[in-house]
Image: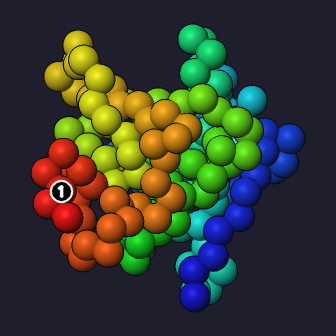
């Protein structure tokens, strides 16, 4: 069974940094200034080994931001990214965030859309800026209309 754990920047985040170093998309990313004032979600596999992590922090524009959300390659397809996203959005709700931002690679846009994130104007070819307002956060990860296989694209929802 998989489980998740919250950490703050006041905790020992070595496990978060170890996971981050092993996620191919974050190769070479070590401790960053944002780690000094952040909340982290850490996922553990059935052997209680850390296998995924993500970060929530307040950026230079005073926006809550999710980033560094990743799962080890050999642990993917176990819904751990879903667990981490829900944990971070739940923490943002606990902190009364008015909205949450994320800059995501184009292939990851549908994943974030499941939780209510919408695309903002994009000025980058590499990352797509997205935002969800507090009242738009969907912790269930779908439109919650009993639809199966919802991609989170509620504009196309027929029910």
What residue is drawn where x is 24% and y is 76%? 148
Q: In which quadrant of the rendered image does the N terminus lie? A: bottom right
What residue is drawn where x is 31% and y is 47%? 113
Q: Position of residue 51 (x, y in %)?
A: 53, 67
* Position above or below: 141 against 76: above
Return the residue nearer the eye: 114 or 65. 114
What residue is drawn where x is 46% and y is 42%? 136
Q: Is residue 6 left or right of residue 67?
A: right
* Position above or below: 42 against 92: below
Q: Position of residue 158 (x, y in %)?
A: 14, 60
| Residue count near mark 1 (Cα–Cα under 10 Å), binned few <14, some 14–19, many ≥20 | few
Residue 40 visible (yes or no): no
Residue at the outermost right position: 10
Which residue is label 1 attached to? 157
Which structural element holds mark 1? loop
What residue is drawn where x is 55% and y is 38%? 134
Q: In which quadrant of the rendered image does the C terminus lie? A: bottom left
* Position above or below: 125 against 131: above
């Amino acid at each position: 069974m998989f489980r998740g754990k919250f950490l703050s920047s006041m905790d020992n985040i070595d496990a978060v940094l170890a996971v981050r170093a092993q996620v191919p998309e974050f190769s070479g990313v070590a401790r960053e200034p944002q780690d000094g004032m952040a909340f982290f979600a850490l996922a553990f596999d059935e052997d209680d080994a850390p296998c995924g992590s993500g970060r929530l922090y307040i950026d230079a524009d005073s926006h809550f931001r999710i980033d560094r959300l990743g799962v080890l390659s050999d642990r993917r397809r176990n819904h751990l990214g879903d667990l981490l996203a829900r944990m971070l959005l739940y923490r943002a709700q606990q902190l009364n965030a008015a909205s949450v931002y994320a800059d995501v690679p184009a292939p990851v846009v549908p994943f974030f859309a499941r939780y209510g994130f919408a695309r903002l104007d994009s000025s980058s070819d590499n990352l797509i800026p997205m935002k969800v307002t507090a009242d738009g956060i969907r912790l269930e990860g779908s439109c919650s209309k009993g639809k199966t296989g919802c991609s989170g694209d509620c504009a196309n929802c027929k029910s």
